Amino acid sequence: MKQNFYMCLSMLLEHEGGFVNHPKDPGGMTNLGVTKKAFEEYKGTEVSEQEMRDLLPTDVTPFYREKYWDKIKGDDLPAGVDWAVFDWCVNSGPSRAARALQVVVNATADGAIGPKTLEKVSEREASEIIKDLHAVRQEFYENLSTFDTFGKGWTRRNKETLEQALEMV
């Protein structure tokens, strides 16, 4: 829902935390959930480590709206579903999250949420979509080669997202 963006962003930033540069994280240098590479592509210029360390929520808000929320049609998704898809979208990419939603609602899984997907979403209870997304997301995580390293955190995040999304319905 359109009015949910800032609330969802706030929850997202809690999940993402601050600056990290874990050697086993394929995303590399990250702050507030934004990778250096993605922020450089968005800005159209190189970004130093210090600039990454200095990022503020106000710096990343337009990035998250354009690159994630708008891509998954967050304004058009029901409350709770918007959060479940947005959080996974940021964690694993817009296309993966969109395809998961499409599979859950029996729409064509092309990775781009459009009118047909939104129609299918409207035909199901938001709470059921959220629960199904949680299950699909957990299965996805458990099949990743880095689950041994990051699985505990991903599982916690997925559970928190489920609980928060259901509270929004």
Image: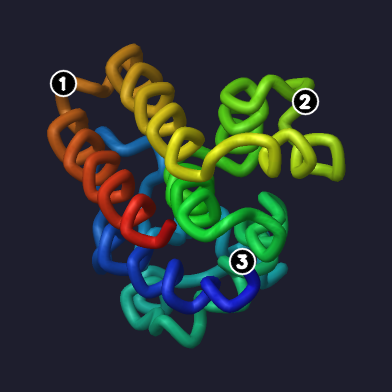
Quarter location, residue 148: top left
Q: Nearer the viewer, mark 2 or mark 1?
A: 2
Q: Earlier in the sequence, mark 3 or mark 1?
A: 3
Is the residue marked by circle 1 packed among few (<14), some (14-19), or many (20+) residues within 10 Å? few
Residue 106: image x %, image y %?
68, 20
Residue under label 3, please give it.
1
Rendered residue at 48%/87% (across/down):
58
How crowded is the residue under tag 2: few (<14 C-alpha within 10 Å), some, or many (20+)?
some
Question: Which disc number belongs to residue 148?
Answer: 1
Q: Residues within 10 Å of mark 3 (few under 14, many from 20)?
A: some
| Residue type at tag 1 | Asp
Would you say residue 45 is visible in this rendering? no
Relative to 131, residue 67 above or below: below
Horizontal arrangement in the rendering, residue 118 relative to residue 102 (left or right)? right
From the viewer's perspective, is the residue at label 2 or at label 3 nearer? 3
Q: Secondary structure at mark 2?
A: loop
* Residue type pointed to by label 2: Asp
Front position among marks 3 and 1 = 3
Query: Of the residues under marks 2 and 3, which one precedes in the sequence?
Result: 3
Q: Amino acid at mark 3?
A: Met
Q: Nearer the viewer, residue 39 or 93?
A: 93
Q: Which mark is residue 110?
A: 2
